[in-house]
Image (cartoon, grey):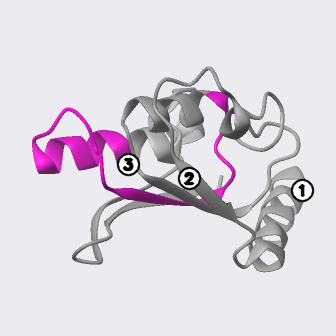
Amino acid sequence: MPVSAIIVDPKSKKIIARAHNLSIRNKDPLAHAEILVIRKALKFLNKKRLDGMDIYCSLEPCVMCTSAIAFSQLRNIYFCAEDKASGGLINGPKLGFSKYLKYKFSFYYGFEENKFSKILVDFFKQKRK
């Protein structure tokens, strides 16, 4: 699935880690781009939290990934397209608006949404052939 994520240090503007969804390839339902990029960034920085860092995602994070982002204490979430079917940040349980998350973050979305949505539609058309 063409979903990717990067973690950026906003001070240096450098990419700390990058990943893409490997759930199907690895036969691992937890191998979402956001989970993988968080793990890579933690390892690279040798830290247990990513406070002060930003995550950029091509698709709205699901509930699992939104929770992982919160627990990792990332500062901001940026994503291209909403995921009305499986999203967990502004769709579904709308964790982005929840008062129950212990760690808060800001989020911004809609960047190149039409372009990324077309990539997803084309991907699934090819997959169904």
Marks 1 and 3 sit apart, C-alpha to C-alpha, by 31 Å
Q: Position of residue 19 (x, y in %)?
A: 41, 55
Say which residue appears at 82% left-offset and 68% top-offset.
117
Residue 24 visible within the image: yes
Q: In this view, does 28 lie above or below 15?
A: above
Q: In this view, does 38 lie above or below 6?
A: above
Write down the residue under mark 3.
37
Q: Please rate how many residues cluster around mark 3, counting C-alpha atoms within 10 Å: few if below 14, some from 14 to 19, many from 20.
A: many
81 sits left or right of 24 in the view: right
Percent coordinates x, y for residue 26 in the rendering: 48, 34
**Mark 1 or mark 2, which is nearer to you?**
2
Label 1: few (<14), some or many (≥20) within 10 Å?
Answer: few
- Give the magenta part as a residue range: 38-63
How far separated are the C-alphas under marks 1 and 2?
39 Å
What SS does tag 2 mark?
strand
Q: Which mark is residue 129?
A: 1
**Residue toward you, 6 or 74:** 74
Q: What label sits on residue 52 in the rendered view?
A: none
The residue lying at 69 percent from left, 29 percent from top is 98
Comes first in the chain, label 1 or label 2: 2
Chain-order first, disc 3 or disc 2:
3
Disc 2: CA contacts within 10 A as few (<14), some (14-19) or many (>=20)? few
**Outermost residue toward the front?**
99
Determine which residue is flagged by label 2: 106
